Amino acid sequence: MAKVKGDIVIDIEKCKGCELCVEACPQETLGLSKKVNSRGYLYVVKIQDNCTGCVNCALVCPDAVLKVYRKTLGKENPVAVVSNVTQDLTLTVNK
Amino acid sequence: MNERTMLSEERHFENMIQAESICTAENLVYERPGTLLDVTMHYCPGCGHGVAHRLLMEVVDELGIQSQTIGIAPVGCSVFAYNYMNIDMQEAAHGRATAAATGIKRVLPEKYVFTYQGDGDLAAIGTGETIHTCNRGENILIVFINNGVYGMTGGQMAPTTLPGMKTTTSPYGRDVKVQGYPLKIADIVATLPGSFYVTRQAVHTPAYVRKAKKAMLKSFQYQKLGKGTCFIEIVSNCPSNWKMTPVESNRWVKEHMLPYYPLGDLKVPSEKETAQ
């Protein structure tokens, strides 16, 4: 199975630190900051680098502060899959 | 080059890929919708209004109907909805959003018209307007946010407050012998012949957010058919007036609100009705 890597960008000035995304994240990637933003709220930060880009955090965010990216790494998808059930096909690969 | 150096080089290349930022335009899977203005909303942390606003604007973006949509803002917490939605908006008198929407839709029948109302606006002062609008079958979408409390005025009891629920005007809990039972507006509307699509949704978990968005998308598409009123009730939270943290309030929605207000479609048009 191909490995999926995700990343998020947080608009910390709009974040109100409601923690709904922290609760919704299945990977426990998110946590609250130690500092506050200009409005006095603790904001959400990434505390682990294991995001898969599942979008759950962005879906429950009431202030739409999250931008989510996702990239599939590792194995490429095969160009074609040949199944030779009746054994009457011969496959030659030109090198 | 021997095998060992090749392997180490490959590993190095893999690490390079890992370290490279994936935050590029082609990897973007989710972004704030363009029609939701780039300002901080005045809602309390964790309020369901923000999610509902965002979903509406996502649907408007996806259908590409920003210039053809007119929204009606209510009185209540969401009174400043016009500051956040980059579409044509009209503010209505308390409870009269559906009446204002009726007028706008009749004058401009080709536009998509929706109202956005809370339970104090739609279920208390505007019950008459709501029921008669749905009974006339006006071709509008009504989005009803139900959090069981009057949010803006400081947490007084609403018609939708659950039995036994404590508010500032029912400090010992709502007594059904004195204050009556919670009003299930969506069920009432579903019985009217004028309503076309009636559904009850929630926004407390990612799965329900996706479902709520689908319901909104459907309602905007049905509006084109011109066959009746679409009504979406969204069971939401009010962390400030329920005196809970946002996470606790969402749990409370699941444990207390949803048993009384079960989610799902209450009136679905048949395939024959939706055929164009």
Image (tube, coloured by chain):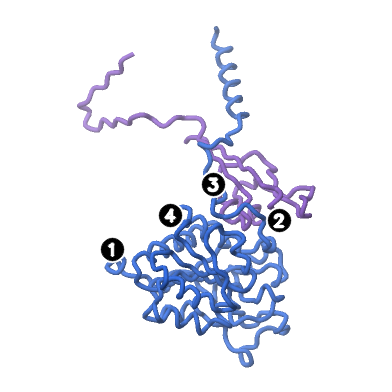
Chain that appears blue: B
Specify the quadrant of the image occupied by residue B259.
bottom right
Q: Label 1 vs label 3: CA separation?
A: 32 Å
Q: Dividing the picture into quarters, in which one does residue B77 lie?
A: bottom right
Identity of the residue drawn at 63% across and 43% down = A9
- Neighbor class of circle 2 (other Cα within 10 Å; few <14, some 14-19, many 20+) is many
Q: Name the residue under label 1.
A: B276
In the current view of this chain or complex, which residue is farthest to the left?
Answer: A88
Secondary element type, mark 2: loop
Q: Earlier in the sequence, mark 4 or mark 1?
A: 4
Quadrant (top left/top right/bottom left/bottom right) for the N terminus of chain B: top right
Give the residue type at disc 4: Leu
Residue named by callout 2: A16
Q: Above or below — where is B269 with respect to B189?
A: above
Instruction: Name the spot of residue A3 as percent of width and height, x first.
Output: 52, 35
Residue at the image position 49 percent from the left and 79 percent from the top: B130
> Which residue is identified by label 3?
B30
Q: Do the residues labelled 3 and 4 touch (CB within 8 Å)?
A: no
What element does badge 4 sit on?
helix
Mark closer to the observer (4, 2): 4
* Disc 1 element: loop
Q: Which of marks 1 and 3 is nearer the N terminus?
A: 3
